Image (cartoon, grey):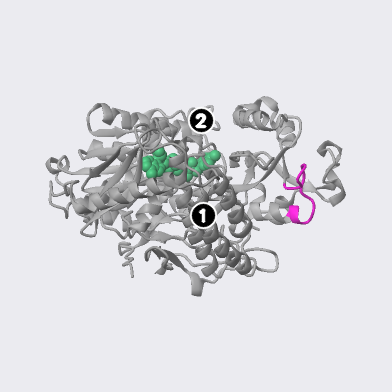
Amino acid sequence: MAKLESKVPSGPLADKWRKHKTEIKLVNPANKRKYEVIVVGAGLAGSSCAATLAELGYKVKNFVFHDSPRRAHSIAAQGGINAAKNYQNDGDSVHRLFYDTLKGGDYRAREANVHRLAEVSVNIIDQCAAQGVPFAREYGGLLANRSFGGAQVSRTFYARGQTGQQLLLGAYSALSRMVGAGGVELHTNSEMLDLVVVDGHAKGIIVRDLVTGAITRHSADAVVLATGGYGNVFNLSTYARGSNATAIWRAYKRGACLANPCYTQIHPTCIPVSGDYQSKLTLMSESLRNDGRIWVPKKKEDAKKNPADIPEADRDYYLERIYPSFGNLAPRDVSSRAAMRMCDEGRGVGETGLGVYLDFADAIKRLGEPAVRERYGNLFDIYHEITAENAYKTPMRIFPAVHYTMGGLWVDYNLMSNIPGLFVLGEANFSDHGANRLGASALMQGLADGYFVIPYTIGDYLAGQKPGSRPAPDRAEFKQAEESVMGMNSRLLANKGRQPVSHFHKRLGKIMWEHCGMARTKAGLEAALQKIPALREEFHATVKVPGSADTLNQSLEQAGRVADFIELGELLCRDALTREESCGGHFREEYQWPDGECKRDDEKFGHVAAWEYQGEGKAPLRNAEPLNYEFTKMSVRSYK
Ligand SMILES: Cc1cc2nc3c(=O)[nH]c(=O)nc-3n(C[C@H](O)[C@H](O)[C@H](O)COP(=O)(O)OP(=O)(O)OC[C@H]3O[C@@H](n4cnc5c(N)ncnc54)[C@H](O)[C@@H]3O)c2cc1C
């Protein structure tokens, strides 16, 4: 059984992080250059981490499967990043951001982690502004804010609808500076395919060069994974098509626990699915809900009518009606389920009936079209590109889609997994969002982890490792991991099947969406747990992977990733089945209040479920880390 010690420091909540920083071990500046740290990933979490560790003096090797760090999925983030600056003087504070985030996560996150996140949020904005990130500004020069779901204050900093891109360019410049200065050795087109564990500690990785196919071994004193989320297990999602779970899944198979895999975020504001051959879904940022009003017709008969022909009196602004305090800014899980209920009642719009309107007519009347264009122009352009509709003239059609995974590798307060020396940052870990992430808090967490947490906590681990003691890559553990990677690739290539990899990914996605999507039931999850192992067998028997291993081969890359998704999908369903309650993004139909809201069971499930791999063909072990709420009361979440 895995040892899950959260290592949350003692003392008052607001003092824990400050106290911890003064108590953890340090590495002497002259010794830092004797340590090598592998960082996998250069999205916001990875590039901020690699740059900062190198600035501190550590030798960093940074690996990304992309051809440039600038292609990380973080570049897609649109709406903004939260911080408790209270520039609006509207009552925000560190405590309020902490409380909103904890409540938003339906009381399934660690109090101390969330408080630290709220504390360092203010430093992130200063750091990024100093790097030159062009945040939107008010007329007087102060940084501007807008509102996001689950909050009654405006605390979201933004750069039009391209906040992730601008933040990533900031972090990438910090990273490039350290690449130029020799502190970071950057390996692009390099995919980590296994973790190497030596004497119980993470000490290296196995990497495939995606251009030449060469497999190489890399040893280090510590390994950091910042490899993003696994939402593409559903095939269709708002994620970049390349986002995958391979790094964390292979670390799981080496002993790292995977926490709360079933906590998936379904975003209410995406462009509806339009056909069978679609390869991804597109987000319309939550920021649009600041000014857009969501509605469906009151009468089923009106669902197919042109929206312009439906009079005001026949429209149901259902979020404003059901959740008057938060209205259109109710949190994502709540808004998504409400949209689904409207469609289930037959009031969904668009050809498929799986859509609701997001209408800017009132905002345009109130602010004028130029002001709306100024705030959201690029999002309206994206919508037009995809649907050929002009959202300045007719309401957008939106529908929920998979968008973020709150689950991930289990980490303690220091962001270290249960394998000593293996740290996990950003979306790849499970740490701060509980069962539902509030909008604009993923960027905050990724940058908090990379710029402000790991630079302290990794020292605590490295101080206990003798400088220069990292294992040589010719050790048996490296050889075994390398052989395992090569063996898997050879088996996939040798298969005499006929079906392309995408065929299996699509089928997995359908099973996941149907049985483990927005609403889950015992019977549905049990059915999925029959179908997925059968799909896995079929995949290994009939998949066709053309080409060879010693050159660029995207089919081979995809095959490995989809093989991992199939296994991860099974764990996700298992986790969802055993969590017999509804909380945040995990909605079990059997556990709901009469008004359709989540019914939690704090007594039985007020814990983190951390799954431990037991070997091929064996059921994984479910460990539990209790969530002790010392400073906040686990209460029923209400946005009414
Ligand atoms: C459309 C969209 C809009 C969003 N908007 C917002 C927003 O407005 N505000 C907000 O807070 N959040 C937003 N999010 C969520 C947020 O963008 C992500 O959660 C966050 O950017 C993830 O950052 P990351 O650094 O953890 O991972 P990523 O940015 O996904 O980076 C992962 C990195 O890991 C590398 N990698 C992965 N696996 C391997 C491997 N095996 N080997 C080598 N390298 C590997 C990749 O190359 C990449 O560099 C949005 C998400 C989407 C999809």
Quick check: 362 left or right of 93? right
Going 53% across and 37% down the picture, which residue do you hit? 145
Q: Is residue 420 above or below residue 551?
A: below
Residue located at (66% from left, 24% from top): 370
Q: Work out whether residue 587 or residue 309 is closer to the camera in this orientation and state it.
A: 587
Locate residue 364, reporting x and y percent. Answer: 72, 31
Q: Is residue 452 in the magenta section?
A: no
The residue at which mark 1 appears reads as: 100
Residue 532 seen: yes
User: Could you classify mark 2 by the number of other residues whose Cα lies within 10 Å: few (under 14), some (14-19), or many (20 or more)?
Assistant: some
The single residue placed furthest to the top in the displayed view is 370
The crowd level at tag 1 (other Cα within 10 Å; few <14, some 14-19, many 20+) is some
How far is the residue under mark 2 from the one under mark 1?
24 Å
Tag on residue 136?
2
In the rendered view, tell whether residue 361 sits above or below residue 97.
above
- Determine the secondary structure under disc 1: helix
User: Mark 1 is on which residue type?
Assistant: Asp
Residue drawn at x 48%, y 46% as measured from the top left: 496
The amino acid sitting under disc 2 is Ala
